[in-house]
Amino acid sequence: RAIGSPYWEVQSYLLTPESRSPSVLERMKATMQNAFKTGHQHGLDQTLEIEIQSPLGERKSISVTSFSIKTAVGYRVGSVVHDITEQ
């Protein structure tokens, strides 16, 4: 499901059902497209704690630190993710 899908769609698969909506997906898309062009995005270089849901319905709490990586043709976004469910 992830291969060949835009990055924001892959991320949206992990949102909890109450967080998923067409407007959230559009906002994620616009934010990510801007990050790929400019290297700037709300939440970059910060650690955020969010709740996700696996395709099997299991909920987890994670901490995510994202950062931009300059390339010859724009930017990429990298992330370090930690499962903090048990903390």
Image (cartoon, rainbow, N blue to C red):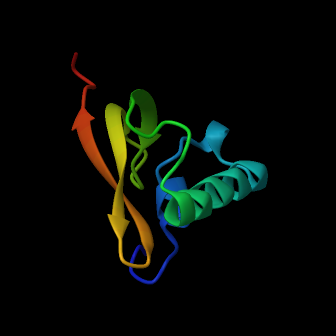
Residue 53 is situated, as x and y percent measured from the top left of the image, at 44, 43
What residue is at 48 percent from the left and 55 percent from the top? Answer: 39
Relative side of 46 to 36, left or right: left
Relative side of 56 to 34, left or right: left
Q: In this view, does 65 lie above or below 67?
A: above
Name the one closer to the observer, 28 or 45. Answer: 45
Name the one closer to the observer, 87 or 6. Answer: 6
What residue is at 36 percent from the left and 44 percent from the top? Answer: 66
What residue is at 43 percent from the left and 78 percent from the top? Answer: 73
Q: Residue furthest top?
A: 87
**Quarter holding residue 80:** top left
Q: Is residue 6 above or below residue 78?
A: below
Which quadrant is the C terminus positioned in?
top left
**Quarter holding residue 84:** top left
What residue is at 48 percent from the left and 66 percent from the top? Answer: 7
Residue 19 is situated, as x and y percent measured from the top left of the image, at 64, 39
Q: Residue furthest right?
A: 23
**Quarter holding residue 18:** top right
Q: In this view, does 7 lie above or below 64?
A: below
Which quadrant is the N terminus positioned in?
bottom left
